[in-house]
Image: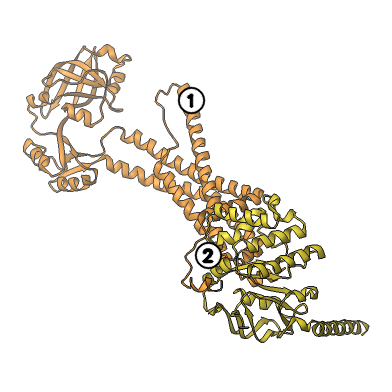
Amino acid sequence: MTKPEPLIEVKNVSKSFQTPGGAVEVLRNVNFEIPEGSFTIIYGPSGSGKSTLLNLLIGLDAPTSGKVTYAGKDLYAMDKNERAYFRAHTLGMVQQADHWVKSLNVLENVALPLYFSGLDSDKAREGAELSLKRVGMEPHAHKKPMVLSGGEQQRVAMARALVNHPTYITADEPTGNLDSHNGDQLIRLLKDLNVNYKRTIVLVTHNLEYLSVGDQLILIEDGVATETKNTDVSVITNRLLADTKKRIDGWRYDRKK
Amino acid sequence: MGGDMTERNKPVQAHVGYDVIIRMAIANLRFKGFRSAITLTGVVIGIGSIYFLISFGIGVQQLVQGQVIGNQSINTVDISPSNSAIISLSQDNMDQIGAVSNVNDLTGVYMLASQVTLDGSSVDLVAYGVQNTYMKLSNLTIEAGAALSESGEDEIIINTSLLEALGVREFKTVIGKDIKVKLVIQDKTVEKDMNVIGVVNSGAGSEIFVSQNVFRDAGVENYTQAKAVVDDRERVSDVRRSIESMGYETTSPIDTLDQINEVFRVFNIVLIGLGSTGMVIAILGMINTLTVSLLERTREIALMITIGARPKDMKRLFTVEAMILSGFGGVIGILVATLGGLSVDLFLNRMASGRGVTESFTIFAISPLLILGTLVFIIGMGAAVSYLPARRAAKIDPMKALRQE
């Protein structure tokens, strides 16, 4: 069996932020590949650098050193407009709820990626309507997104992520605000896009329940990435549980002092 | 799939259409309806007041010009010898003046002190020996009776001031009457009975107008003054220079017009200064609205950049919002100010006609140039006011903005 072509390559990537107390290194020499058509899950405890890594993968935040390539092209060798074009045409992003342009209704919020691809407003809205239909949210098209429930908002967010028929879909803690039923439904939809439509999915989560869905797992801990197979779940889970216990005990100890 | 982007590795040309930008801008302005309405009102008041005052300035200027210059052709030059002992307006010299380029028409006039007697009462006055061209060029319109005929040596036109001095109220009653005219020419006196054929309104002093032949027959050789018509307003000063170089003095309605314009230039600047206060407040209101809007929408802008908007699209969004506010507010401002001006004009005309003024007048000018200028100003204002907020919108770092959750 031949190894599938890597769609995304992360090479020697480090990222640090300047704070008043000095530079803080969030990612340290991260290396991995995301094959085309894979379902990759980036996971790890809160504050470990997952979201920073995802932002690097979608051309939003340049690494301090190292390279991120998409289909062989260095994302950060492009200018801002080219990266905007890449996101508008290639990428679908499922964000946490309440990421909306509040003055626009559901339909127009979903149409945004098409607007930014240069479609005229009528065609973009037609596309948005189809996408809303796919997630069963077309009856809410003319409401403001803020009046919808968390689950409904997440479905609209999904409709927006899929409206431009992206080949590459990322989801940043998409189940964060959802009950388990809605969370499951969303992950099922992502898996369906991956299996049946060959979309490349990158899911960021601190929720370990869904790790078995991914075919490539990347654990981020203190800025260091470790690539694992999903068969290693029990090992990883045990380690995370141990870490959590250590943190909680440490906190209790501090209180006593 | 992945090759999608490499096929389009050229700089991006696909624009977010202006229809989309306008749609989004309107949606945001409507979303913040109350705030937008307040800002819009500020712009309406600002633009409206400045437009109202300037249109008042222009209107009054035109009114004064009309009153002072009247129907007088602006292209005329009045010529008189600076020293009549040396240089005179003889027929030869008149021919020379007539030959100056751009002089279209030239007519001489005789002026003498004289005395008229009607029904026993006498008045001292100025007598003019004229041709009909002169009457026309001097904007002397016949109030009653007729103009001088070509060979009418016994005909005389008198002015209303003279009639008042003679105690005549009904102008028409003097038409056809004989009047005794005494002209003092150098050392001799010529007395003549002349028939009044017309009445003109020529000013505050008593004046009579007779045919030039009366003066010529009495032995007057040179004209006292002449009036030249220049074919092009732009050439008036050239023509004046040429004539002055021959030793004459010249005056022109353009002098008066220039003086009027000079006064009104200052007047209009004062009005613009007054109106600017409102405008400054309106501009500050717009800057405030856009800045607050920018701060409120930092995350939305970050979100839009994240899902594919270019920074320059965000810049455009803010510029278009400012343009809508200033454009919409400006057009309403112009309309309101125009309606206001028309109402004041209507009111003043009604009041004036109630007091016996028959001629209608306009104090608030509707000037296409002013409307055009205001529209250009509005566009410039929108662009200027949005400059900083738009630039800041384009510079928003989506990472930082989204991290501020």
Quarter occupied by residue B370: top left
* x then y, percent, for residue B402: 68, 69
Quarter occupied by residue A217: bottom right
**Chain coloured yellow here:** A
* x then y, percent, for residue A187: 74, 68
Residue at 52% in and 69% down: A81
How many dots with numbers?
A: 2
Specify whether B136 is left or right of A252: left
Q: Secondary structure at mark 1?
A: helix
Q: Amino acid at mark 2?
A: Lys
Q: Residues within 10 Å of mark 1 (few under 14, many from 20)?
A: few
The residue under label 1 is: B350
Q: Chain of mark 1?
A: B
**In the depicted view, which residue is nearer to us: B379 or B140?**
B379
Specify whether A91 is left or right of B356: right
**Chain coloured orange here:** B
Picture layout, residue A237 above or below residue B403: below
The residue under label 2 is: B312
Q: Secondary structure at mark 2?
A: helix
